[in-house]
Amino acid sequence: MDAFILQVLNGLDKGGAYALIALGLTLVFGTLGVVNFAHGALFMLGAFCAVIVKKVLTLERVELDPTQLTAWGSPVEIRTHYIEEWFGDFGTLLIDFSVPASIFLAIPIMLILGIVMERGLIRHFYKRPHADQILVTFGLAIVIQEIVKAQFGANPIPQATPEMFSGSADIGVLMGFAQNTVVYPWWRIIYLIFAGVILSSVFAFLQFTTFGMVVRAGMADRETVGLLGIDIDRKFTIVFGLAAVVAGVAGVMYTPILAPDYHIGMDFLVLSFVVVVVGGMGSLGGAVAAGFLLGILQSFASMNEVKSLLPGIDQVIIYLIAVVVLLVRPRGLMGRKGVMED
Amino acid sequence: MSNETPTNNSRRNILKGTVAIAAASTMPLIFSNKAFAANYTNEPTGSTVTFGFNVPQTGAYADEGADELRAYKLAVQHINGEGDGGMMNTFSSKALKGNGVNGKKVVYVTGDTQTKSDAARASAKRMIEKDGAVMITGGSSSGVAIAVQGLCQEAGVIFMAGLTHSNDTTGKDKKANGFRHFFNTEMTGAALAPVLKNNYGTDRVAYHLTADYTWGHSQEGSIRKYTESMGWKTAQAVPTPVGAGDFSQYITPVLNSGADVLVLNHYGKDMVNSLTQAIQFGLRDRQVNGKQFEIVVPLYSRLMAAGAGENVKGIFGSTNWHWSLQDAGSKAFVKSFGKAYGFPPSQAAHTTYCQAILYADACQRAGSFKPSAVGAALEGFKFDGLGNGPTEYRAEDHQCFKDVLVVKGKENPSSKFDVLEVVEVTPRAQVEYEASMLGGNLGPYNNG
Amino acid sequence: MNWLNINKNDRNLLIGFIVVVLLGPLIMEPIGGGYPDLLQKFAIFGIFAIGFNILFGLTGYLSFGHAAFLGIGSYTAVWSFKLLTMNVIPAIILATLLGGFFALIIGFIALRRSGIYFSILTLAFAQMSYNLAYSVLTPITNGETGLQLRLHDARVVDGLFGVERTAGLPNTELFGLAMSGWNGYYFCGFLAIVGFFISLRIFRSPFGLMLRAVKSNQHRLSYTGLNTRPYTLAAFVISGMYAGLAGGLLAVTDPLAGAERMQWTASGEVVLMTIFGGAGTLLGPVIGSAVIKYFENIFSSFNEGILLNAFSFLPEGLQQAFAWTVGLFVGEGWHLTLGLLFMFIVIFLPGGLMEGATRIKSLFQSSTKGSPPIQKDLPVEKS
């Protein structure tokens, strides 16, 4: 039973990440009709916002100590963090909280990046075949990740959780388990809550604001909305920015769980497409549901009991489910007819 | 469908025909070009000899590949008599005089393996077929090393393996034209097990998470073999997909499995992630069976360990070489490398530098670049001064035998390069095994 | 050449193709690509892309899983070398057939859906094949290392014919002719010509016309009471056979089959090759695959030393600066160049490289005719 609960938690956690990425992707699909292969790169850029903030916060003053030499004969460098020098303990605290603090950098940066991307490139591809959209956004994704690689190298750069969240919570005790049987890392719990908050605020935004109403109307019937004299294009630019922000903050918060490297976006790309399609093209609810479903099933498939029955099932479960869902429900879990079917 | 753009064809056809005839008559020239009077593949005839450096430049191991390339450049400089000479000064064989090899200046070509067997072979083929490389070296993965080694055997050039740790490279898949300086999982198991016994006792239950590919299984097998023979039990050995990223679904079953040691048979990115996540799940804070829960990472890479930061502290593993070693060879190499690039070399850089020097030295002693002659010079070759103490290239399987370093994550690192400390240098005798144990067959040398 | 039953333009195209294949080594020599392995790759990936184009270019069905058939072809061929004979004929026949067989199964299921749902289904099948080949199926595929020949392989047929066992590993051969080096290239080149010819015939046939109709409007087609699935399935199987053949040839020229051949990136590569060159055109995919393979093999090999040499005519400071700047785009930066190239092509030449060629051609012709000629080969834009 404890193993079961733990895998549910793992699944929810993974699902949260999948859903956050898929949400932005399907938002762009649904509104702009664009297949954005650079969406993974946006997630990666978000993660690197955390890396950059950490880098800036830990900028060091380098003093050379000529009395000591390194093994290769240059003087030993003594490094002190500027932040700590200036702000003392507060500086240390700031460094400690660099990941959550990065969100404040990531939101404006991702918004600007998203808008620039839409205005500068994506906009010109609305009317082009999906194959062209794939090629151009894939090219863009490669360019972005190569620039990041040139700057930060290929190795993963783990980001620490703030000290106070670094341990794990003994949540099993609440449910009547013995001590230390069901423990879960604080940060993963935070991530799950965070994912829930972001997802519900995006939904609330689309559901309860005029802006959201127009966007939803645009998703359903773009032409009519345009005929009503509403500047749907400008709205869609903002939607694209919003999708970028969601991907970006998801990336920031994920860094303590998964050490970011330049390739992390590509690693998530295929998976997020599967999630979106299983959920049904253009359906926000479907994407979220599929994200959690795939996350949980992936976790269960990795249990030793399951693996001993079906060796290798954990390697293919995601794709297997995709095949089954698409064969049983032609448009995914909640897809609408006629979206991206031709 | 026949109303294509009309063009003026007849003239172009004549042109094409002429070109075709001209081409047909020159075709034999291409064939004869390379095959002409060569004793062996790519016999150097001019004043230079070409080495092929095949390292990952894109993909997950690009940083390691970059470090290998730095070491190769340094080795070429030293062989050609430029720079400070590095480990050539401490190397026991004095055949190389700093004027190239066999009177020829060493030049090199590079290629990108992408850490994929196919791409690595394509890149090696280019260096052999187009650039005339007489030796291929490099790589950062066992699968790639084995694939390229097979290619070099077929093409008739020598392969000096880079970072490859699987037993198979010089075991089941060994080839006459292939040589490895790096150690293997068998040696890791033999060296690590006694240290684990001294620190954690003989009554332990281990849980393995194993990267699901050649090296992972090799590593798991060796560690199980040696830990089980000293009394440890293995609770479970679970294969994990390569590049899984989030390992939480494999880590939670460890919690209540009754195991009190977690062995992470992961390397590179997988190692960084699985280790970080295992620690987030509080594994190292647990008490199981009345004992402190421990984590072991059998193969350490300093480049990757630096990435894992705090999390590696106190965790045992093994490594082929570490820059903090104090013998004359290591000191000379660190000095030479650090001067050129501003930071100390990784174990990948060290093993590739050694391989380049060892190959050049063997050619010099053989007086030829012919694979069979070079191979004969390397087989059974005993040397010292390359940072690992007295070493032998065993004739039976073309594997170097030398002391193995058991390391652990340093508690108080003095710099970002200072993440590992050597806890024991396991003597060669303790890690040696019969060549027949790992199977395989060298076969004859292929000179092309 | 009336017996080929093709019109004059197509005949010229075919002759041109044959000439280029024959002269490949000479053409590539000046730009540093005149060595067997690269030209073999041109021919093999050319075949792969030609086949992919029959599906994607004609029907518009975007498969993201064609690499699976490439991998299956390779594994089949290597197993044929191991169990039967080192002769390449059975190997490539079996590879083609098995590629087609798996395409039939996967196509039968995947073609129940269209659009992106079809793409994801094919992707899912290919990724499952890759993940299993890499891990659980290691006894058949030899996992990460890739399936290789061994000294003690059975090679039953060779044994029956009394082929002597060599001390080292045997070579793949075509009745005694070793299939490595230039021989291998011309063998692949020959099959590329055959493949190109078949594709040309398909493009010009009623069957090809039907496939194009599927692309331009499948609904309208089905309203006429026509079931389109047999046609699309046939196209899928044919392109699967091309992929199987290409995979088999990869093993012929280099007898090793690696699992990463089946990864989604490999499937993506053939999509890129086709779009890059010009989907729906006859020559485009071949050109696209050649350009991408050239980048992968040649651009990645330019290192600092080579660059400094190339700019040695400049004064030292400039030499360093130029070498550094160019160095960002070659060597370890070759991916960056590829990405930029993709973007450039799609933005400015929506029809791929072939559209570029057409535009240049029409530049010369428009002066005499007034209006640019209509290209029937360009892909039909979809709504």
Image: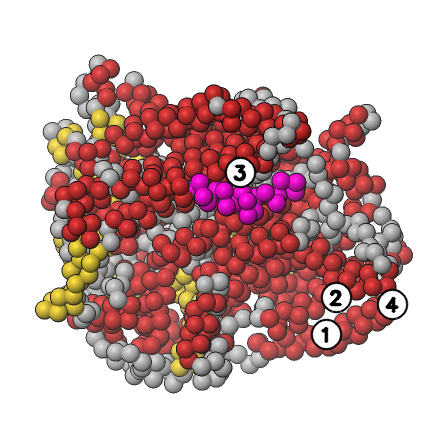
Specify start and end residues of the magenta stretch as a single range.
A110-128
Question: Residues at badges 4 and 1 in contact (C-beta under 8 Å)?
Answer: no
Name the residue tied to disc 4: B10
Determine the residue positioned at 23% across, 47% down.
B309
Dot 4 falls on a residue whose secondary structure is helix
| Distance between the alpha carbons at the discs numbered 2 and 1 | 9 Å
Q: Nearer the viewer, mark 4 or mark 2?
A: 4
Q: Chain of mark 3?
A: A
Q: Secondary structure at mark 1?
A: helix
Q: Chain of mark 2?
A: C
Near-viewer residue (A284 or A328): A284
**Res. A237 mark:** 3
Q: Main secondary structure of the magenta part?
A: helix
Q: Which residue is found at the position 13% from the left and 69% from the top? A: A66
Q: Is there CB contact under 8 Å for labels 2 and 1?
A: yes
Q: Label 1: which residue? A: B23
- Residue B439, percent across and down? 36, 53
Q: Splitting the image into 4 quarters, where does residue B181 fall?
A: bottom left
The answer to whether residue B125 is visible is no
- Identity of the amino acid at label 3? Thr
**Which mark lies nearer to you, 1 or 3?**
3
Q: Residues within 10 Å of mark 2 (few under 14, many from 20)?
A: some
